[in-house]
Image (tube, rainbow, N blue to C red):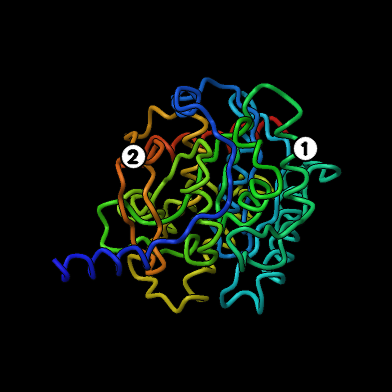
Amino acid sequence: MLHYRLLAGLLLLSIPILAQQYSNLPAAQRIERLSPPETPLRVVIDTDTYNEIDDQFAVVYALFSPEQLEVEAIYAAPFLNKRSTSAGEGMEKSYEEILRLLERTETSADGFVYRGSRQFLTDYNEPVESDAARDLIERAMSSDKPLYVLTLGAPTNVASAILMEPSIIEKIVVVWLGGKGLNWPFASEFNLQQDVMSSKVMFDSGVPLVQIPTQPVTSHLLLSIPEAEKYLKGQGAIGDYLLEIFSQYPKEVNANEYAWSKVVWDISAIAYAINPDWFQTELRPAPILTNEKTYSFDNRRHLYRVVTHLNRDKIFGDMFRKIEVQVAKGQ
């Protein structure tokens, strides 16, 4: 008996103590918000755009889908890797990259692009205030129509907005590319591990959440240089730019270019908002993210939606066709 008590105690230590009091969203309303959405949707995009080269595809895909997505704002998210010396510099470089994309798509940045957090959360209960978090709160509260927050990086800006104004849980739906699949031996991947505190807020707050795991889901979104050349070369300033950064990436990461392909993860969140029929999903009790970056489970937890599979060809086909159509309209 003592052995089992000790084991239970150790398990409890690995699970965060939740002090934050979140808005109590009724279960029926959460399930309704987690139902496949009908377009057009109000959306904002939260993106660590300069982290690598897939967010750029996602931003363009969203901007070129006006019939399904009403993109109201884009937020620069923090990141820290070989492309930045700090989370704040990563955010600033993402902000600048967003401006480059808007210039090439002839989209005005005025009142449309916002700087996000300059650091990750260091306390589960303390937000990092930013222009992005404040704008998210204002937009969420401005309408009864749900605001879809397409979250492509560390969810610092989104978690901070929830901590600053918990009632926005009643106004938003978060679609987040982050974490591994629930059956994976560990939860950790780049977006989740960049800001573990914010990732915990995603799972714990009760916000209507659609999680799109990397493995074994978005890892199917592989793109090769020959395919990118076929569909992007000559497709205006934005097509040539996407092809340029994609083609240069193998050298940056010292990849073997023979039969090389790259996962373009972040277009998954945009595609889900455009057409959820391209995805297989499950409603599950939200997992508990432990300090060891694994999942723990309690069937008494609130429900969320997790993606288990996607149709790679439908997603890439839709994106490439829209780039071709939008570029042709501008010529």
Asked if 29 appears above or below 111 in the picture, the reply is above
Name the foreground residue: 100 vs 76.
76
**What amino acid does circle 1 point to?**
Glu
Residue 154 screen position, x and y as percent: 56, 59
20 left or right of 303? right
Q: Residue 148, percent across and down? A: 59, 34
Name the one closer to the observer, 295 or 13: 13
User: Cα distance, mark 2 to mark 1?
Assistant: 32 Å
* Residue 300 marker: 2
Q: Amino acid at mark 2?
A: Arg
Q: Earlier in the sequence, mark 2 or mark 1?
A: 1
Residue annotated with mark 1: 138
Place residue 303 in its image quadrant: top left
Q: Residue furthest front?
A: 1
- For image coordinates 34% across by 48% down, the residue present is 217
Q: Nearer the viewer, mark 2 or mark 1?
A: 2
- The x and y percentages for residue 323 are 58, 38
Q: Name the residue furthest left.
A: 1
- Residue at (66%, 36%) from the top-left corner? 167
Q: Vertically, is 53 above or below 319?
A: below
Q: Can residue 331 be seen? A: no
- The residue at the point 71 percent across, 72 percent down is 89
Question: Callout 1: helix, strand or loop?
Answer: helix
The picture quadrant where one finds residue 1 is bottom left
Q: Give how far across and how far down residue 290 sits, in percent.
A: 39, 62
